[in-house]
Image (spheres, rainbow, N blue to C red):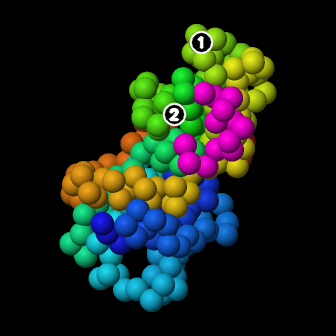
Amino acid sequence: MALILNIETSADICSVALGKDGAVTDLLLGAEERDHSRILTTLTGEILKKNGLRMQDLEAVAVSEGPGSYTGLRIGVSTAKGLAYALKIPLLAVSTLEALASSVTAEMPEGIRKELGAEGWLCPMIDARRMEVYSAFYDMQGRRITEIEPHVIDARSFTGERRQRKILFFGTGSDKCKKVFQGDNDLFLDGIFPRADRMVSLAEKYYREGKFADVAYFEPFYLKEFVATIPKDFLQRDRNLQKKKER
């Protein structure tokens, strides 16, 4: 049993939460999207001060390991590793999708639970831009069934799985499925997104099991290689400059 700082930066809104013995004691959310680098350390200081705690009171720090935003994950993991190293406490890496699946097993309305039944599957989804998502299937106990993979969503996605059983889709990427999935087995739960309080129970579980990440070598689970892109206005400017040179 431990006092754990939980850091979630895989999505647009970053958040921090305190967990004590597996129960959420406080949560703070960033006010603006994609502002992780500026606000994360501020949120960490605020949540400790608000609860009358010092950094030295923490017994572990947990961080969302991904998949998710490349930049967000990098910021969160760097911060968490720095805290773990400086305070000489364990680092816990929590799968973003597993945290969503685990929390939904407790949060879902009873009506949806009954409709899914014992054989239903959960499908947390992280938005990966355009029509792509990161996802995996979990059972009703939050145990992962399939590998975490990127998928391009269209009407044929997961056809076999959707025919065999009812599936609950949720997360930041599930709206893409709403537009194209219209089967009787397709269920959706809105308002579920990566948040630090949804990591708390898993972080406590990992702490008890001694499932610690290596502070020196741990890297986020990006799932796909980061590809830097050049803004369109930059490309247009370069084309205009090139045309002037050719005249």
Tell me the magenta residue range.
Answer: 105-117
Relative horizontal placement of residue 127, taking residue 76 as reference (left or right) = right
Mark 1 lies on a secondary structure that is helix
- Magenta residues, dominant SS class: helix
Q: Residues within 10 Å of mark 2 (few under 14, many from 20)?
A: many
Residue nearer the viewer, 122 or 242: 122
Callout 1: 10 Å neighbours few (<14), some, many (20+)?
few
The relative height of residue 47 versus residue 201 in the rendered view (above or below) is: below
Distance from label 1 to label 2 (Cα)? Answer: 15 Å
Which quadrant of the view contains residue 178? top right
Q: Which residue is mark 1?
A: 164
Left or right, residue 161 beside residue 55: right
* Residue 176 shows up from this direction: no
Q: Can you give x and y, in whole percent of width and height, for residue 227 in the image? A: 49, 38
What residue is shown with label 2? 140
Callout count: 2
Q: Position of residue 118 (x, y in %)?
A: 54, 27
Q: Type of residue at label 1? A: Gln
Amino acid under disc 2: Met
- For the point 69% across and 36% down, the residue is 112
Q: In this rendering, does residue 11 appear at all?
A: yes
